[in-house]
């Protein structure tokens, strides 16, 4: 008969053997990925040395009575909840122009109104108090998800940050107003439901990120395109104050003359209709009649598919609207008077922003040109050479709006104490040189996330061949972003000097085949367009 001592000895021997096998194989025993959040216990999954938590609800499902209402906290749960699957993608149309892998991802994950979730990547053997980076996806405020494979945060987490991606309501579900809603919900924020979701996600991060190794006082928000617009919106929302310490707005275009208004007519042109006007059009389309209560009930009973079908054929933007509460005023105006959050800020754009509309069929370009240039006079467009066609001018003007507004907002950071940096991407991958006129909208995204080898076709032609120079370029850009998240300054030893931006020197960091600060980059054209926008604003306010 074996004694307890023999059992204990055998157990010790087995334990030592297991440790030796682990050391010899180079493997690391799986650590516990269980964390406690304000809603309950979560269990994540492992990807080598990175713990991943997917599909974490940061707000209740915005369905039924909660459709077109400010987000409310999610319910708590008992026991441990698995966080190994992404949450549903917010309702959107599948895009014929999207690559197959992206449409496949959307189909696999699923689309549902119950979509307010976030995802976290964090080093397994982390110290406490790691810098946090929260990425806000783009997609014209009509597409996108924090779960897109190109936004996988593993590489950034290995660089020593906690990476968070989020979903938020988009399209009509994320930006909507109607007089019946204004009347019956007058005691709460209106219109900008997607922005409210972003704020709710940041509040959740503030409350819970310590459990994942992050420092809630060192959060950097960054986003591209619609995500960059969202960053600029969050810079001016009173409700987001204190929820982030730094901000990066990439490839975002903000109207300098006047933003879309929630409840009144805007400046003549593409943004003249208010959000309420657009909501009235929707109600007319669906033949909604009756009292305010009946109309509101009908709005909330609309099938998501019907909303998406109606949305698909419209040429309107879903950028944040001025509602007086969440977005108190035009974003540019708030920056001008120093009302933005006083945090370090990076803004920038690319040299071929208009690639987004370059491949649209000719008839589509004609409609786009009409929409873009509506309300603009010959004086507003005089900077463009006469040889440009109306469609050519529209393409050029569309691309320039990204560049002029990012430079303008960076310059207006002089109204607060925090510094700003400005960049301009001109890099073209080696095998595309001579085939494309510049750096496409968002071409830097997979480089920053370190996922360019998996998704080299993101925002660029297919069959892209990567070179060592391409990869080295991406590593350097990512190093600037990581440095900014960690220290509040993208500059650092071993990298080309990136000076702070001010309007006097107008030094812009060109991220091209060479990395160098350029003085007065595109100054004549940008100054002209900026001045014309401010003239239009002044004339409108007379």
Image (cartoon, rainbow, N blue to C red):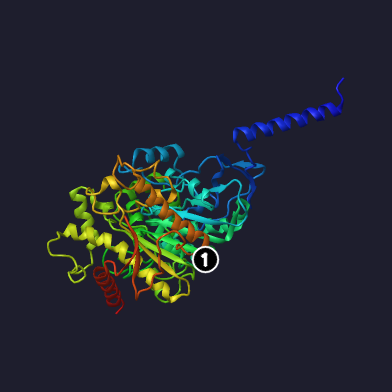
Residue 439 image offset from top left, x and y in percent: 30, 54
Which residue was labeled with disc 1? 239
Residue at the extreme bottom: 542
Is residue 175 visible to us here? Answer: no
Along the viewing direction, whichever of 159 and 316 lies nearer the viewer: 159
Along the viewing direction, whichever of 541 and 9 lies nearer the viewer: 9
Question: Is 476 left or right of 132, judged from the image as shown?
Answer: left
Residue 443 image offset from top left, x and y in percent: 34, 51
Question: Is 39 left or right of 90, judged from the image as shown?
Answer: right
Residue at image x 20%, y 67%?
Answer: 381
Q: Quadrant of residue 296?
A: bottom left
- Where's the N terminus, which quadrant? top right
Residue at image x 66%, y 44%?
Answer: 78
Q: Quadrant of residue 275?
A: bottom left
Tell me if residue 178 comes above or below residue 96 in the rendering.
Answer: below
Residue at image x 18%, y 58%?
Answer: 392
Is residue 209 visible to us here? Answer: yes
Is label 1 in a helix, a strand or a loop?
helix
Along the viewing direction, whichever of 17 and 368 lies nearer the viewer: 17
- Where's the C terminus, which quadrant? bottom left
Residue 330 image offset from top left, x and y in percent: 38, 70
Residue at the extreme top: 1
Along the viewing direction, whichever of 378 and 76 lies nearer the viewer: 378
């Amino acid at each position: 008969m074996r004694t307890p001592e023999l059992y204990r000895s055998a157990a010790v021997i087995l334990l030592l053997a297991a440790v030796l096998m682990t050391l010899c194989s180079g493997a690391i025993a799986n650590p516990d990925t269980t964390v406690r959040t304000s809603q309950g216990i979560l269990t994540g999954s492992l990807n080598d040395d990175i713990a991943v938590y997917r599909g974490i609800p940061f707000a209740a499902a915005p369905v039924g009575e909660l459709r077109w209402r400010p987000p409310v906290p999610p319910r708590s749960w008992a026991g441990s909840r698995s966080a190994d699957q992404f949450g549903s993608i917010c309702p959107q149309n599948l895009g014929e122009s999207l690559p197959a892998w992206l449409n496949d991802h959307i189909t696999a994950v699923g689309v549902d109104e119950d979509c307010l979730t976030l995802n976290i990547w964090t080093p397994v053997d982390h110290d406490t108090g790691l810098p946090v980076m929260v990425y806000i996806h783009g997609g014209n405020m009509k597409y996108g998800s924090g779960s897109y494979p190109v936004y996988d945060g593993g590489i950034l987490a290995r660089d020593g940050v906690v990476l968070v991606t989020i979903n938020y309501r988009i399209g009509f579900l994320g930006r909507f107003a109607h007089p019946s809603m204004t009347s019956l919900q007058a005691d709460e924020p209106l219109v900008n439901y997607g922005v409210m979701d972003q704020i709710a996600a940041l509040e959740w991060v503030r409350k819970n990120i310590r459990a994942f190794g992050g420092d809630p006082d060192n959060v950097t928000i960054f986003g591209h395109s619609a995500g960059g617009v969202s960053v600029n919106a969050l810079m001016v929302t009173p409700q987001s104050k204190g929820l982030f310490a730094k901000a990066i707005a990439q490839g975002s275009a903000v109207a300098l003359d006047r933003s879309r208004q929630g409840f009144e007519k805007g400046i003549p042109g593409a943004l003249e209709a208010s959000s309420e006007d657009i909501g009235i059009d929707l109600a007319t389309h669906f033949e909604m009649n009756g009292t305010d209560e009946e109309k509101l009930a009908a709005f909330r009973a609309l099938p998501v598919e019907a909303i998406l079908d109606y949305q698909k054929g419209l040429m309107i933007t879903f950028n944040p609207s001025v509602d007086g509460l969440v977005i108190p005023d035009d974003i540019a105006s708030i920056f001008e008077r120093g009302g933005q959050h006083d945090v370090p800020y990076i803004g920038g754009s690319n040299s071929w922003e208009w690639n987004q509309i370059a491949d649209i069929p000719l008839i589509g370009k004609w409609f786009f040109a009409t929409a873009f240039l509506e309300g603009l006079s010959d004086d507003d467009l005089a900077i463009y050479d006469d040889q440009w066609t109306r469609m050519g001018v529209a393409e050029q003007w569309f691309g320039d709006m990204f560049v002029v507004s990012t430079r303008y907002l960076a310059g207006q950071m002089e109204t607060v104490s925090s510094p700003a940096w400005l960049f301009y991407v001109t890099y073209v991958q080696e095998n595309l040189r001579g085939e494309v006129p510049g750096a496409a909208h968002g071409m830097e995204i997979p480089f920053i996330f370190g996922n360019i080898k998996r998704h080299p076709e993101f925002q660029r032609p297919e069959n892209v061949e990567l070179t060592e120079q391409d990869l080295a370029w991406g590593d350097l850009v990512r190093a600037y972003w990581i440095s900014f998240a960690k220290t509040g300054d993208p500059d650092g030893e071993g990298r080309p000097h990136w000076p702070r931006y001010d309007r006097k020197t107008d030094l812009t960091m060109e991220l091209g085949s060479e990395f160098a600060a350029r003085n007065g980059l595109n100054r004549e054209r940008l100054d002209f367009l900026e001045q014309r926008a401010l003239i239009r604003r002044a004339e409108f306010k007379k």
